[in-house]
Amino acid sequence: MARHKKSMVRHLPITKARINLGDVIKRVHRDKEYIVLEKGGLPVAAIMDIDEFEDYLELQDPEVNQIIEEGTKEYLVGKSRPAEELLAELEEEERESDVTAAR
């Protein structure tokens, strides 16, 4: 079973980040690290992977939050089923569609 690696938060002076920008970006993207940039010892900005940033922006959308809220309510009242069950159903529908198309 794959383990989810906990993201690390590293603090780095802006001047050091500037000198090592390629390495900083690689660590953020490949290792999913967060880099907090500091100026004079104070945090002023942060760097995160683009995929995570896009997820963050999406969660700022009120429509997305509404969909999440509705899904949570449905789950809490028992209107859900295991993913394996849904996937098996979709695979069966696809097989049936393939058989129909082959005729």
Image (spheres, grey):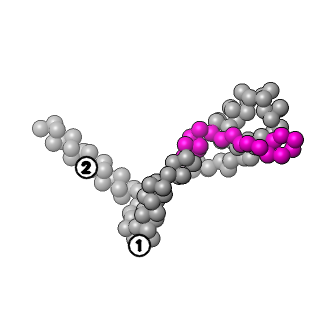
Tell me if mark 2 has few (under 14), some (14-19) or many (20+) residues whose alpha carbon lies within 10 angstroms of its own.
few
- Residue 44 lies left or right of residue 82; in this view the side is right
**Amino acid identity at mark 2:** Glu
Q: Residue furthest right?
A: 40
Q: Quarter-wise, where is residue 89 in the image?
A: bottom left
Residue 93 vs 28, above or below: the answer is below
- Where does the magenta region start and end? 38-55
Mark 2–mark 1 contact, CB under 8 Å? no
**Amino acid identity at mark 1:** Val
Judge by depth and name the residue closer to the eye, 45 or 5. Answer: 45
* Secondary structure under the numbered disc 2 in the rendered image: helix
Query: Alpha carbon of mark 2 to alpha carbon of mark 1: how far?
Result: 27 Å
Residue identified by numbered label 2? 93
Magenta residue check for 86: no
Percent of width and height locating residue 45:
73, 42
* Secondary structure under the numbered disc 1 in the rendered image: loop
Would you say residue 75 is visible in this rendering?
A: no
Q: Nearer the viewer, mark 2 or mark 1?
A: 1
Q: How many marks?
A: 2
> Mark 2 vs mark 1: which is more N-terminal?
1
Percent of width and height locating residue 88:
33, 53
Q: Residue at x 83, y 46 (%)?
A: 42
- Residue 26 lies left or right of residue 61; in this view the side is right
Q: Quarter-wise, where is residue 97 in the image?
A: top left
Could you tell me which quadrant the C terminus lies in?
Answer: top left
Percent of width and height locating residue 86:
35, 56
Residue identified by numbered label 1? 77
Q: Residue at x 24, y 45 (%)?
A: 95
